[in-house]
Amino acid sequence: MVEVEVAQQPGGYVLVRLRGEIDMSQAGPVQQAFARALAAGRTAVLIDLCEVRFIAVVGTDWVDAAVDELTRQGRVVAVVCADSGPVRRIVGVLGLDGRWPLHHDAAEALGRSSDR
């Protein structure tokens, strides 16, 4: 099961945070989250996958489609996931680490020092 959070942040970006497991059975919540981010009209979108324990290839397809559409719209997008773990492994195996603007934490993705 996946938990989804989509929230406009004070820093002027939209946060899409996914937690849990992402597979075909979670299509509705995940695709709705990305649709809300696309409709939010904000410049930047931060996709946080740090708390995803499992992601099927179809889940990476949904993230990839969102990254592509956001980029096509000229919006800044960042994908955050741990430097190791299930998400980073599948992203590397599929070669998405060369396509996605990956960051290891939100502070880095937002251009902030993590010690502030």
Image (cartoon, grey):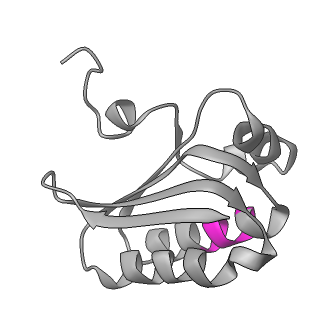
Residue that sits furthest to the top in the current view: 115
- Residue 74 on image: x %, y %: 37, 71
The image shows a total of numbered marks equal to 0
Horizontal side of 28 relative to 107 (left or right) equals: right
| Secondary structure character of the magenta stretch overall | helix
Residue drawn at (77%, 78%) of the image: 25
Residue drawn at (25%, 14%) of the image: 115
Horizontal side of 56 relative to 111 (left or right) equals: right
In the displayed structure, 14 sits above or below 31; it is: above
Q: Nearer the viewer, residue 90 or 77?
A: 90
From the image, which quarter does the C terminus lie in?
A: top left
- Residue 111 on image: x %, y %: 29, 33
Classify residue 107 by image quadrant. Answer: top left
Magenta stretch, residue numbers: 60-65
- Residue 21 on image: x %, y %: 71, 57
Residue that sits furthest to the front in the current view: 1
- Residue 71 on image: x %, y %: 47, 68
Residue that sits furthest to the right in the current view: 93
From the image, which quarter does the N terminus lie in?
A: bottom right
Residue drawn at (46%, 83%) of the image: 35
In the displayed structure, 66 sits above or below 50; it is: below
The answer to whether residue 114 is magenta is no
Q: Nearer the viewer, residue 16 or 1?
A: 1
Classify residue 77 by image quadrant. Answer: bottom left
In the displayed structure, 95 sits above or below 103; it is: below
Residue drawn at (57%, 43%) of the image: 51
